[in-house]
Amino acid sequence: MTGTEALAWAVIALAGAAIGATSIGGVLVVPALSSLLGVPLPEAIAASSLAFLVTGAYALTGKASGALAHLQRDAPLMLTALLGAGAGAALAAWAPGDAVRGWIGLLALASGAHALWRLHRPYPRADHPWPGLGGQIALGLGVGLGSALSGTGGPVMLLPILMLMRRPLSRAIVAAQVIQLPIAVAASGAHALAGRLDWRLGATIAVALLLGAWAGRRLARRANPRPLQAATAAVLLATGAWFLLA
C-alpha cells in the first residue's frame, strides 16, 4: 500500500468516526476515492452509496434504536427520500463531472462550517413544530437527490437543515440516522442496475466506515468528542476548497 492509498483509507476511517460521533463526515468518502485512489467519480459515488447502507443499519443499534417504528409518522420524508435518491443516482451518471465535483465541494464546505458552528454554539432552541406533509415531501426529495448526487448518506444534509429550521433536536437526530437506509437502498439499486457499482469496493469502504463509526461512537460516549469534531471540520473545509479550486 502506497502512502497515498494509506491516506485515502485514513480519511475514510475518519469519515466513519465522525459519523459515529457527530452524524456528519460522510462527504469525505467520495473525494478520498476519486482524488487519492483514482476511482472515476461515478463509480466512487456508487460505491460510497452502497457503504452507507451499512452505516445506516449500524446507526439503528445506537441512538436511533427502534427508530423505524417511531418514525412511521415520518413515512412521507422517508418515501420521498427514496424517490429523490433514485433520481440523484441517475443524475450523477450523466451530469457534467465538474458540476458534480462542485456540488460535492460546496457540500463539504457547508458541512465543515456547520461543524465549526456546533463547536462554539449550543444547539438552537427548538421552537418550531416538526414539518408537516408538504415540508417532509420537500425535505425528502431535496435531501435524497442531493445525497445520492454526492454519494453521501443523508445526515450531512438533513441534520443541519432541521437544526437551522429549529425543529426538535432529538427527533432530528433520529430522522437523520434513519434516512440513510432509503437513500442508500435507492441509490445503490440505481447504480447497480446501470452497471456502475463495484460491490467489492463498496464492501471495503463499508468495513472502513463501520470500524470508524464504532470508534467514533465510543469516543462520544467516553470522552470529549470536540477534538474529533474540530479535526473533521478542518478536513471538510480543506476538502471542499480543494474540490472547488483544483
Image (cartoon, grey):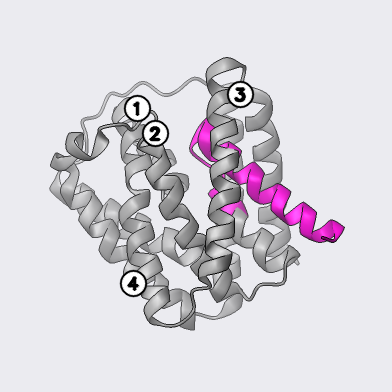
Three-letter residue code for mark 1: Leu
Please name the residue that numbered disc 3 is placed on.
225
Please name the residue that numbered disc 2 is placed on.
163
Residue 153 visible within the image: no
Residue 9 visible within the image: yes
Please name the residue that numbered disc 1 is placed on.
169
- Residue numbers of the magenta segment: 1-28
- Looking at this rendering, what residue extends furthest in the right direction? 3
| Residues at marks 4 and 1, CA–CA distance in whole angstroms | 28 Å
| Residues at marks 2 and 4, CA–CA distance in whole angstroms | 26 Å
Q: Residue 61: x and y, percent?
A: 37, 33
Residue mark closest to the camera, 2 vs 3: 3
Three-letter residue code for mark 4: Ala
Please name the residue that numbered disc 4 is placed on.
87
Q: Residue 108: x and y, percent?
A: 59, 52
Look at the image and say whether residue 179 sits in the magenta stretch.
Answer: no
Residue mark closest to the camera, 4 vs 3: 3
Q: Is residue 164 shown above or below 154?
A: above
Q: Residue at x 53, y 53 (%)?
A: 206
Q: Secondary structure at mark 2?
A: helix
Q: Are marks 1 and 2 in contact (CB under 8 Å)?
A: yes
Specify which label sits upstream in the sequence, 2 or 3: 2
Q: Quadrant of the C terminus?
A: bottom right
Q: Residue at x 19, y 34 (%)?
A: 70
| Residues at marks 3 and 1, CA–CA distance in whole angstroms | 18 Å
Q: Label 1: few (<14), some or many (≥20) within 10 Å?
A: some
Q: Quadrant of the N terminus?
A: bottom right
Instruction: Report the side of 60 relative to 39 (left or right).
Output: left
Q: Secondary structure at mark 1?
A: helix
Specify which label sits upstream in the sequence, 4 or 3: 4
Residue mark closest to the camera, 2 vs 4: 4
